[in-house]
Amino acid sequence: MIRILSQNMIKSGGLIFCIFLLVSMCSSYLRAEEITLDDALELAISQTARGGMIQGNLEVAEQNYFARRINFYVPEISIKGSVPSYNVDESYRFFGGADQKQLYKTRDLGFDSFIELNQNLLTGGDIVVTANLLAREDRYPNTRMDAEAESFINEITRRGFFTLRYTQPLLKPSESKNRLHNTHDDYRIAKLEKIEQETALKKEVTETYLNLIKLSVNNELYDARYQSAYLQAEIDSMKFMDGIISEEDWLLSTSGRLEAELDKTEIESETVETRRAFSILLDRDVTEQFELSEPKVAAHIDSIKRERMLSSWEESVPVKKADLQYKKAQREADYQASGHGLTGDLTASYSTGQGFVKTDGDRNDIDTKGWGVSLNFSYPIWDGGSSGAAVKAARIRADQARLEYNQEKQNTRTEIFNLMNQLDVGYRRLGIMKKQIDLAFDRLKIAESRMADGQISEITYLESKIFHLETKTQYLDELKKYLLNRIELESKFLRE
């Protein structure tokens, strides 16, 4: 009997152990993923479509600048040519000393090709080098006086040419150099805009993250308010039945319970919507569960970093971006104005060619050389005012960019000082509010102990709980403001 009982206990113990192990494995598998604020920011920047588009904008500007720079410093080489072509021409006309028109037929077989090299220069000029090859075989009527009737001449031509041409614009900047500078500025501006766009994304993620944590606290808060209102309504209902309070007081109490229930429902709905928005923000499945943890306050900005930021506000991202936009607009205005007045260009060329022409076996060699220099000027007399209007518009845009640059300097300097001040005040307020939370928590524990001993009612205990939760929501509001201000301040400066 004892042996059977022992065996049953062993079997039951093994079964309980297996069930416990299975439950532990399932609970660990089904446990919601914990996402910290740093994790959320990293996911948003590096693993979301929005973060990818931000990075893609910079890569597009970088590739445009790379292509323009390669095109400016590296020669462009092109090869053109034709496949051998065969042409036949029949003409009815006078040839040579004929006294009447005759029908003659000519034939030619030709091939033409050339290689061209185009190189931009730092001076704004261009060098074009062309190598040309011509091969032709012609057959046409012999129109000499002593030629036999209907005789033909066979002619073979082989020629090769080499041409060098240099062009230098005068009294105006180079168009290719201007485009290179513009794409370079666009690339530098895109790098600064990437910081601004990532900052906006970080602030949106941080705000949604803190809102979710606050909503989780608000769910407890509104649940406690509902419990308190429910208990108060029950008490007032009994008081009304006993004639202690009036019907109006009882109706007010019942209405307060219904309002508390409505607020609780709205908070639960807002929590679901905010969790869904947070999942979409991180490109996550909206059905996936996750848990959030309250972010800790990082060490406050030390005095050395503070002084460096305050003294280097002119090197901040908004100021540098406005400066680049102003310089780009000013350069464009100068370029527009340069083409309105007197302009010119200097052109120098050199060419050489060799080859031969063979006619019915007689060969004639060709050896040619030539060079030339030309200086050309142009000055517009009248175009209806369109050129002047274009220059004036470019000047206005440059003046606007200059005003925006000066305004941005003032705004950024003031904003940095204000952010510094708000961070100092916010950091001190967080420290004080943290102590208030600790005091409210101690008060809650005392109230819980006194309620267990029957010294206070559950409503009085709920008042302590509500006070503790309200203090936490105020702290979370201040924490969100502090973190957003810190993100904004750090985004003003390039990462070292």
Image (cartoon, grey):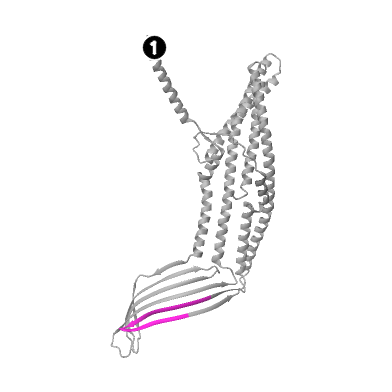
Residue position marked by numbered label 1 in the rendering: 5
The segment highlighted magenta reads 347-370
> Up-down: is 118 above or below 105?
above
Q: On the rendered structure, is 376 left or right of 76?
A: right
Q: On the rendered structure, is 121 left or right of 137?
A: right
| x and y percentages locating residue 266 in the rendered image | 60, 31
Residue drawn at 38 percent across, 75 percent down = 134
> Up-down: is 338 above or below 449?
below
> Up-down: is 172 above or below 259?
below
| x and y percentages locating residue 263 in the rendered image | 62, 29
In which quadrant is the N terminus drawn? Answer: top left
Name which quarter of the figure residue 272 lies in. Answer: top right
**Identity of the amino acid at label 1?**
Leu
Q: Nearer the viewer, residue 308 or 267?
A: 308
Magenta segment includes 36: no
Residue drawn at 55 percent across, 77 percent down = 375
> Up-down: is 270 above or below 465?
below
